[in-house]
Image: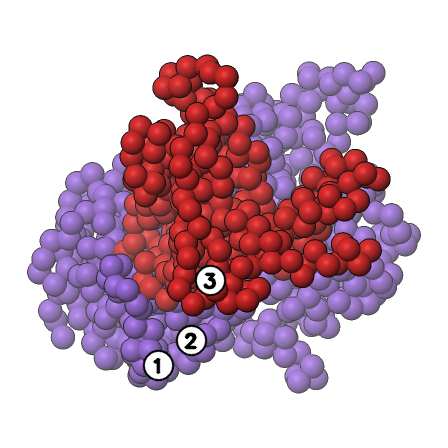
Chain colours: A red, B purple
Amino acid sequence: MTAALDLFASAGLWAAMLRIATPLIFGTLGALLCERSGVLNLGIEGIMTFGAMVGWLTVYHGGDLWLGLLAAALAGAAFGLLHALLTVPLGVSQHVAGLGITLFASSLAYFIFRLAIPVSGSPPTIVPFQVLQIPLLSNFPFLGEALFHQTAPTYVAILLALLLGYLLGATPLGLAIRIVGENPHAAEAQGLDPIAIRVGAIAFGSALMGLGGAFLTLSAFNSFFPTMVQGRGWVCIALVVFASWRPTRALLGALLFALFDAYQLRLQHIVGKAVPYQLFLMLPYVMSIVALLVMARRARVPQALMQPFRRGER
Amino acid sequence: MNDIVLSLEGITKRFGSLIANDDVTLNLRRGELLALLGENGAGKTTLMNILFGHYAADAGRVVAFGRELQPGRPRAAIDAGIGMVHQHFALAANLTVLENIVAGTESIGRLRGDWRRARVKLTEIARRFGLAIDPDARVGDLSVGERQRVEILKALYRDARILILDEPTAVLTPQEAEKLFDTLRVMAAKGLSLIFISHKLHEILAAADRIVVLRGGKVTAERITANTNKNELAELMVGRPVTRPAREAQQPGALVMRAENVCVAGFRPLSDISFELRAGETLGIIGVSGNGQSTLGRLLGGLVKPTAGSFELLGATVTEPTPASFVACGVARIPEDRNVDGTVSDMTLWENSVLERIGERRFSAFGLVRRSGARAFAKTIIERFDVRGGVPDTPIRLLSGGNMQKLILGRNLLTSPRILVAAQPTRGLDEGAVAAVHAEILAARRAGAGVLLISEDLDEILQLADRVQAIANGRLSPSIPIEDAEPRRLGLMMAGAWSEMA
């Protein structure tokens, strides 16, 4: 029992938490931005897969790691625009469009990957992002190892959460996005263009999803597998609810989920003999359902979420 | 004082084959309070939506302060100094008052919103026009009257010089409405020009300087308020003389329904309501929308169970209510929302006519529908209640609101009910249909049914009810005879202030 608790005292657990959380932070922020403008984007799972592939392929063909991230973001934005086209001006079911995009993007990612890399024994690898040493902070005992031994995209993700919180709360653009998600007719009466704002929010949010996927191939691992996103997109969708549609809470939610995940990995080593490891794999999901039950009841849903906006119709 | 600030010139707008506005020309002067009068479907709202740029007109132009507005762009109207207060408020409930007001007013590229300056400006405007409001309140927490204030402030914040109000009093108590018109007069005195849309004659006569009447999409008359009267306006609006049927005195009979300290839990709960309903009388329940009428309607239709108190139907205590048992007892129901609860829009007239009593032998046997019987029933309703615009096999959604309501009335009244629960029976109907529905309700009362009329319309209650109780915040006032119900007293009751009057 004490061994199970001792795990929390290891710096490795906390470092793993940040690493595991990073793709979730990107994905959750992306989904959150889409939903704040009133559009559910279930394309996330596929967009992350596609971002992972594009980022990896860019680097494999000699591109810089940052160029890989940029390519993943642009690819994400492209799928975002497709989703936006379907759901905003055309107003089709957001669930169906999103799931369609997930299936399409995942398959297309594998297809392109196979065209570029014909079947081989072991998957080819790239040199991923290396841990970024931050002067002073990284050398701090325990805390340095726990919190400041990460690759650059992790810091970017955390910064993005704070920036997005500021954008939504304190800028006219953020207010415009929120009012479109709450009541597009109110936004229109204020002279805003709900369609343009939604399309923009979806494109940008989807770019963030692409980044989340690319983190997997460019930092967490060094090669691409078609199944590597492994439901992280769906976790992000749940985290948005958990976070009550607030970026800073999304950051906390992603960290919490990642902590469970990192913890169960380590717990497996201690008690793995007695209990099947699949049970541990379930742990973070069970915990997130419980947390969702507690948090979501109080969540304030954007009121126009999933309601298509048609001009002149009330 | 005579300079024209706004003119609509030859506005025409078609929706498919329907002509909503037909060559409408209209001028508004500085400091003027202009009323746009017309029935539902006369094209008032369409015209205002064109003016504000929600729609683009098929022909004609809008000129504000000497400059033509770009059609179909609300932004152009806002920039020209036109503000609109929508009938269905265009507000985001989860955002604060201040956020609702400043959204879209600052350049979107700014890295920081200047909320402090916005707050100062808002406070100053609110003070100048006497529209007190807490800028940090969440709009969803405000009362309807306060929300309307936010709508007006939104326009004033953008320096509107012309304000359009679409049915502004539809959701207000008479007192709130009076206060609104005081505010509008202050605004006109300060040089703003206002257009308000209404079909309520008394308030138009009380508030407007000039009245433009719209009928069938055309301007049919223009009057200076001082030179006209209620009867003339009613006739101009409808196009023919209309008289609503009058109530005749009648001795009430046996008790048919009784509630004593009944409570209902849930969304918009009811607490401690008591009433009695006798055969051959009409009990009116007056109230501003959203005060528990829907829950009351559900209680009376057998859809919800009382959580406390005693509720009797024809002398028997109701314990496990179901809509079917209520129908079987002879409770006829006109639901509040005929499109949602009253009809199934894609089903035909005959299907909608028999849905409530499909189990009866004349409509089904051995698990199969007897179409001939059902069609015959629908045909009888259509003839007897003058339902126009369809045959038994027409989908009901193709009917107008008034005809749909007549069918609902018909399917209920043809079975000689003991009790008629009519919730907002004339909401959204035009004057002709209102008269028809009123006549049927009076006929049901004459035939000995106890009528419970839930309405937001003061005139309707005064014309039809024998006694009246007010509903406010889920509570019912004691009943007063209609002879004692003058609008001022009813207004106080609707605001929940009945205990102070005792």
Residue placed under numbered mark 3 in the picture: A138
Residue placed under numbered mark 2 in the picture: B135
Q: Which mark is residue A259?
A: none
Q: Residue at x 70, y 72 (%)?
A: B477
Residue placed under numbered mark 1 in the picture: B123
Q: Residue at x 81, y 53 (%)?
A: B305
Q: Residue furthest right?
A: B316
Marks 2, 1 in one chain: yes
Q: Quadrant of the C terminus of chain B?
A: bottom right
Other residues around mark 1 within 10 Å, as few (<14) / some (14–19) / many (≥20): some
Q: Nearer the viewer, residue A107 or B274?
A: A107
Determine contact: label 2, label 1, CB under 8 Å.
yes
Residue A147, above or below A194? below
Q: Amino acid at mark 1?
A: Thr
Q: Earlier in the sequence, mark 2 or mark 1?
A: 1
Q: How many marks?
A: 3
